[in-house]
Structures are given as structure tokens and as C-alpha cells.
Image (cartoon, rainbow, N blue to C red):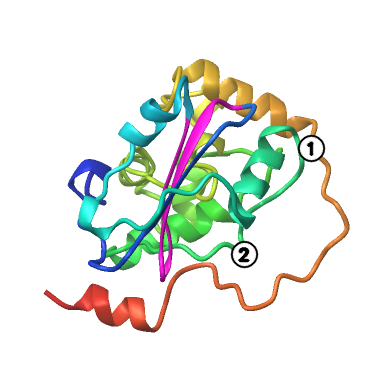
């Protein structure tokens, strides 16, 4: 089971925090040199968005209000199609099962949904729907790992911990139903999950 976001130990490297407004409320984004560590949104103020993040103050650089990923998240909140699958993630320490669940969840595109059982099957563990639910509940990478697209059997929304909860989850799903993919564009040099030096850091301690 993935540790709760408030218990997660991030890599001891300098991180950048961005706080910005969007059509889905105030968002906060934390990035390490290895990838994105956290995304929160649906908050009424920048202070509330920042309070949702977990980080060591000594690890912070300057707080940002713009940047390439910030602009993509803002455009997404306005209804622009983006699957974010090219964005590198700094997942920290995860089991092989958790990594498979995250990868399977990232394959669910805007406008699509899956049940917990279907996601478990896609992760190679068809009887592990409850364990998949635990991985999704601990997700700290909202939108980049689109846990809002995972529903209970029968199409019930299930739960959602961000912002207003289920109303925000419903808003997201409604927003995505109206999205249409743009022509493919090249995004060179991106990896879906941080590797290399981050693996070495994560193996330490």
C-alpha cells in the first residue's frame, strides 16, 4: 500500500513549488529534479492549495506561479485535451504492484473510465480491486495519475478526497466528456516515470 501523502518521504533534493489559479480552483504543484511529486487542486485560495502539499521547507526553491506544466494544467482546466502521459513522475518508493497500477491508471484517457476491477485486471491482478482502491486513495498526483476516472462497479462515482469531493469528481468527468484530442505533437525527452538517478536516490536509506 502506498504511504499516505502526509507520511511520504520525498527525496532530499531541491524542489520547486508552483501555486496558481485555474478553472478547477487553486492548484499547487511540487516538482523535484526527478519529476512531479505532487499535484493538488480544487482549493479556494493559494494558501489552501499550498497547505495540501507536503514538503520540507529546507528543500524548497522559489515558489513559482507559471511554467510549462502550470500552463498545461490551466489549459486542461479550461477544457483542453491533455493526457499528461509524457510528464515524468517522481513516485518515490513503490512496490511493483503499485507501479503497475499507476501505469495502468495513466493509460485511462480523458473521456474514459474504468472500474477498480478493470484497473486491477489491467495491472495484472484481477482479484485485487480492493488493493487498487487503496493505491488510488493514496494518490498524490491528481490529474497526472487520473484516479478520478476510476469508478465503482456499476458506474458509481465512489469517493474523491480533493476539493469539494464527489461534486469535483463529477465536474472533472463532465469536463473531459467534451474534450477532443488535438493533433499529435512531439514532446521530446520525457519519461512517464522518473528513472536513473532517482532510482539510486530512492534505493538509499
Q: Which mark is residue 179?
A: 1
Q: Tell me: residue 139, above or below residue 175.
A: below
- Percent from the top left, x then y, of residue 5? 27, 44
- Classify 10 Å Cα crowding around label 2: few (below 14), some (14-19), many (20 and above): some
Labels 1 and 2 touching (C-beta < 8 A): no
Q: Say whether residue 50 is visible.
A: yes
Q: Could you tell me which residue is drawn at 42 percent across and 48 percent down?
A: 63
- Give the side of residue 150 with respect to residue 78, left or right: left
Foreground of the two, 32 or 65 = 65
Instruction: Tell me where residue 111 sits by quadrant.
Output: top right
Secondary structure type for disc 2: loop
Magenta range is 24-41
Magenta segment, prevailing SS (helix, strand or loop): strand
Foreground of the two, 118 or 132 = 132
Decide whether residue 120 is among the magenta residues: no
Decide whether residue 33 is among the magenta residues: yes
Q: Tell me: residue 46, above or below residue 110.
A: above
Q: Could you tell me which residue is drawn at 54 percent across and 44 percent down?
A: 65
Q: Tell me: residue 175, above or below residue 76.
A: above
Q: Which mark is residue 86?
A: 2
Amino acid at each position: 500500500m502506498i504511504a499516505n501523502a502526509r507520511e511520504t518521504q520525498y527525496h532530499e533534493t531541491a524542489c520547486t513549488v508552483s501555486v496558481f489559479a485555474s478553472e478547477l480552483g487553486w492548484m499547487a504543484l511540487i516538482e523535484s529534479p526527478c519529476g512531479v511529486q505532487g499535484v493538488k487542486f480544487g482549493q479556494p485560495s493559494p494558501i489552501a492549495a499550498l497547505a495540501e502539499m507536503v514538503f520540507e521547507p529546507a528543500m524548497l526553491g522559489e515558489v513559482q506561479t507559471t511554467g510549462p506544466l502550470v500552463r498545461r494544467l490551466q489549459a486542461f482546466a479550461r477544457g483542453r485535451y491533455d493526457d499528461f502521459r509524457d510528464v515524468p513522475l517522481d513516485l518515490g518508493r513503490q512496490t511493483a504492484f503499485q507501479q503497475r497500477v499507476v501505469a495502468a491508471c495513466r493509460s485511462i484517457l480523458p473521456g474514459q473510465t474504468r472500474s477498480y476491477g478493470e484497473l486491477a485486471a489491467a495491472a495484472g491482478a484481477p482479484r485485487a480491486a480492493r488493493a487498487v482502491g487503496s493505491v488510488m486513495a493514496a494518490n498524490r498526483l491528481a490529474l497526472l495519475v487520473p484516479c478520478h476516472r476510476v469508478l465503482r462497479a456499476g458506474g458509481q462515482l465512489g469517493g474523491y478526497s480533493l476539493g469539494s469531493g464527489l461534486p469535483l469528481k463529477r465536474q472533472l468527468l463532465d469536463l473531459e466528456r467534451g474534450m477532443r484530442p488535438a493533433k499529435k505533437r512531439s514532446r521530446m525527452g520525457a519519461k512517464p516515470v522518473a528513472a536513473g538517478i532517482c532510482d539510486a536516490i530512492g534505493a538509499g536509506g
